[in-house]
Image: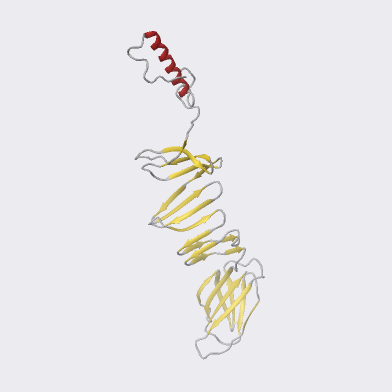
Amino acid sequence: MTWRVNEPLGSTNISTGAGYIRQNNQSIQDTIGIDHAYMGQTNAGKHKKVTLTQQSSVPTTISSEGALYTKDSGGQPELFYREESDGDIVQITKAGSVGPIRDLTATSGDNTIKMSTNNASTKVSFKDSSNVQVGYIDSDGNASFNGNVAVTGNSTVTGTSTTGSSTVNGNLTVTGNLNVTGSGIPIKAWASFYISGTIRSSSNVSSITVGGTDYTINFTTPMPNTNYGVLISCGYTGVSTDNNFVYRNKLVGSVTVRTASTVNELTVMILG
């Protein structure tokens, strides 16, 4: 159907002009009917569907408006949204599936957590007050942090460097048990203490019981079995002397170590 944008003219006779008007009315109805119910139909003026032609470039937006559009991604048109004032671009579909593929942001004080999701994986990013990423965790098993990381509770890491990896550039503090399945030697418990039984620093150790040159390290959380390893070192501030020490009475709730001579302090690590 021909669209006669400049007709009828003022000089067009009534009969011919009426035909032009009918043609234009039909063109309007055919055009509106592509995505809408047109006049005279049920739900006239409402959308039946929305057809978006593929854009060659990202549309611009001004304040208080957003743009929904399609553009090529991976060889096929995908749905995108651009926020106001030429803001962030959000990919909504990918490979025929609905994402959403965007950042979900939560802010507390100077810290920001962003979660990016697509059809393949999920990534949680941690950003500082300057919006600089300081770490991330993704659903492929990868994690990386710059700075100090504190974990309270029991944490389990499953994977090796080939299926997932975790990198911490800074101090990692774990309150609870850290269980690692894969490449790595997890420390189940450790304590540095004086021969009086006073603990200097420790993890998963509730107390030290002293009995002569026997020192029993009592675990806060018991070991799952007695197949763990024990590493022992000692410190002595007097004249240098050789020392021998062994562990004995290895139980799920404690282990006893013995020294052959007097020392000032001991450090015991439980590996499993």
Work out whether 122 lies above or below 257: above
Between residue 255 and residue 80, name the one nearer to us.
Answer: 80
Between residue 54 and residue 9, name the one nearer to us.
Answer: 9
x 60%, y 72%: residue: 270
In the displayed structure, does residue 258 sit left or right of residue 6?
Answer: right
x 47%, y 54%: residue: 125
Residue 77: where, in percent of width, then height?
Answer: 51, 39
Work out whether 18 lies above or below 64: above
In the displayed orientation, state which residue is furthest to the front. 11
Q: Quadrant of residue 45?
A: top left
Between residue 48 and residue 150, name the one nearer to us.
Answer: 48
Q: Quadrant of residue 213?
A: bottom right
In the displayed orientation, state which residue is furthest to the bottom. 239
Q: Where the C terminus falls, by quadrant? A: bottom right
Q: Quadrant of residue 55?
A: top left
Residue 214: where, in percent of width, then height?
Answer: 60, 81
In the displayed structure, does residue 62 sit left or right of residue 262?
Answer: left
Work out whether 216 lies above or below 174: below
Residue 37: where, in percent of width, then height?
Answer: 48, 23
Between residue 30 and residue 236, name the one nearer to us.
Answer: 30
Work out whether 12 lies above or below 110: above
x 46%, y 64%: residue: 148
Q: What colour scheme was applied to this rendering of the protein?
A: secondary structure
Residue 168: where, in percent of width, then height?
Answer: 50, 64
